[in-house]
Amino acid sequence: MEVVSNRYVVIKNFINGTPNESNFEIKTDSISLSIPRGSGVVIVKTLYSSIDPYQLNRMKESSPSQNAISFSARINLGEAIDAFGVGRVVDSDHSEFKKDDLVIGVLQWAEYSIVHEFSTLNKLELIGFPLSYHIGVLGFSGLTAYGGFFEVCKPKKGEKVFVSAASGSVGNLVGQYAKLFGCYVVGCAGTNQKVELLKEKIGFDDAFNYKEEPDLNLALKRYFPDGIDIYFDNVGAEMLEAAVSNMNINGRVGVCGVISEYTDTNKRAAPNMLDIIYKRITIKGFLAADYMNVYADFISTTSDHIRSGKLHVLEDVSFGLDSLPAAFVGLFRGDNVGKKIVKISED
Amino acid sequence: MEVVSNRYVVIKNFINGTPNESNFEIKTDSISLSIPRGSGVVIVKTLYSSIDPYQLNRMKESSPSQNAISFSARINLGEAIDAFGVGRVVDSDHSEFKKDDLVIGVLQWAEYSIVHEFSTLNKLELIGFPLSYHIGVLGFSGLTAYGGFFEVCKPKKGEKVFVSAASGSVGNLVGQYAKLFGCYVVGCAGTNQKVELLKEKIGFDDAFNYKEEPDLNLALKRYFPDGIDIYFDNVGAEMLEAAVSNMNINGRVGVCGVISEYTDTNKRAAPNMLDIIYKRITIKGFLAADYMNVYADFISTTSDHIRSGKLHVLEDVSFGLDSLPAAFVGLFRGDNVGKKIVKISED
């Protein structure tokens, strides 16, 4: 019975405000890589971990929606942080999984995860793309962009689309789907380098650095002289207010994240309700998991676009378990370009 | 050619904040009751004027949406205020209208209106109800309630519905439609007398006086232990925030007015966006005019319910042109119970 050391990441304290690396600690346990029969569990070696901003809300002492659904459940101090990832089965006492299977689902920020809860674990069938794509462009980031843009925002060709956090994991894909669909797309990001990338490589019609705009309302008027039809919101707060002010009649706002509100619970969007009424604006929150009905479409459309070179895959990969805290903290500094991923182990 | 005096109401100054009667002035002109042929206009004697809170937004120096659509256009100082009403044609040089026709549409806060713009004027066909019903329960107030509840909020039987300003012109009807449809309905209002009326006469399942609740969030938790599925919002601000906090998954908010924000532009709802995302809440602004597709249904359903005694008609009528300013100002003190109407002249 092989026993090895297993390193994993925990939070030392609950986090209010912007996270920093000192909030995290790397701990080591020993773990047996062979499972006693009858235990019903599976041991998975983590290959890639998905790094996502929403996790910060699970690290607060009192997450506002902690009981709503499981992925919003508070993370306990001192326990391995659970997160979406790709791994390989090391040993299994579960009939659906066997040694050496590739799996995708909720694992841990750990070298090895013991999985007890199988509703979120699936065997991963490769379709000719790198493993990491399955937690990014072909995973929940992609489905959030695809389901959110097509099912929530219900675009028409030629409509004007604004995307915030546009170089992020979801935003860059929303912009690309919108362009491929025939919309006019402007994105905002936090550095000039990201703005260049969006315009030159990713194919946005235009982009701007919001940090260089003293008045977001005026900035949006400049970039959308004919108004905004769809706003795909990843940030909330004053950007949402400015977008609502610049929306056209029957405008739609899809909200899948509000990163600027995660680090400051007092920072909230207070859009002008008269605009919302007179312009008949719809604001809708959503989760990718609600759009499993379009999952097959999403995978086939996205795979085709990647293969034909029409869709660029933006990944930002760090290496090794030790880099997990910095990778996560960096999301809130805007360090990442595209999907942030940590490669934990070689396959 | 009969010339008579015509009294009408104007604003003396733009209004920021709560209106009071000194903002208004009654002026007198002389008017000829016979129209020169070739002028193309119609003279209408006003019988009933509709008194509606949204008009306050037209009396501000800088209405935020003044150019969006015509009924949000700013009212000019010193000019007769235009408003929905019922009247009788005195003379007409327009082929669609003849002397003695009953008409409904945009008239003025005046004894007589000269109508130049006919897109909003229609002949009124009586169907056995008092004239005043056509600017209330069978008019835009009714259509706002009907279209907003059924088309925007898309109720299911048994769902839990919260209505603010529940004794107002729209709110009381939303509650009644919701009860007749099979929902559980709680309303809030600003006096204990209104609360009693809602519970005892109008048939709400429950109601409360929001002025006696120090914490709206806790109040809603008490009245909706199983959460709110639909919030029909007439007030905005902290009530909208509290409703969002207490909503269930897939909750819907229909917003047709935000009276508490009209008198204070700094007072804005800043709902928790994490609730909106995690609970997939939809917030949608709307105008009754968008639901003309259900107008025939609305009239037939509502007429039937009135005739069978299942739907109570709440009207609050003042008399005479001189009472217009007080009637309007009273809306913002919560003086009215049901639809506020001023009877300008006997037919």
Image: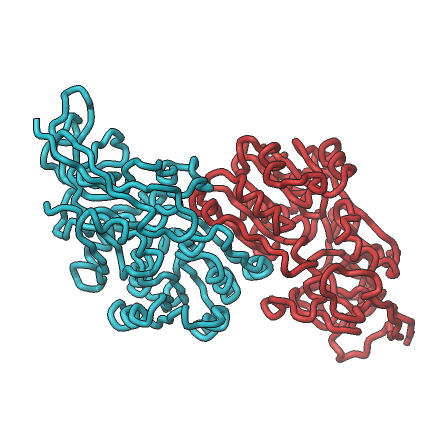
Chain colours: A cyan, B red
Question: Left or right: where does residue B75 sit relative to residue A212?
Answer: right
Q: Residue at x 29, y 64 (%)?
A: A180
Task: Mark yes or no: residue A226 visible.
Answer: no
Task: Mark yes or no: residue A139 visible.
Answer: yes
Query: Which x, y percent locates residue A217?
Result: 50, 69
Query: Which x, y percent locates residue B233?
Result: 61, 48
Residue lying at the far left in this picture: please name it: A1
Residue lying at the far front in this picture: please name it: A22
Query: Which x, y percent locates residue B58?
Result: 69, 66
Query: Which x, y percent locates residue B124?
Result: 73, 56
Q: Residue at x 61, y 51 (%)?
A: B237
Q: Quadrant of residue A158?
A: bottom left
In front of the other: A251 or B137: A251
Where, quadrant-wise, is the N terminus of chain B in this rendering? bottom right
In front of the other: B244 or B302: B244
Q: Is residue A206 above or below residue A82?
A: below
Question: Left or right: where does residue A211 sit relative to residue B15?
Answer: left
Q: Quadrant of residue B230?
A: top right
Residue lying at the far top in this picture: please name it: A38
Question: Left or right: where does residue A214 sit relative to residue B106?
Answer: left
Q: Residue at x 37, y 52 (%)?
A: A148
In front of the other: A207 or B329: A207
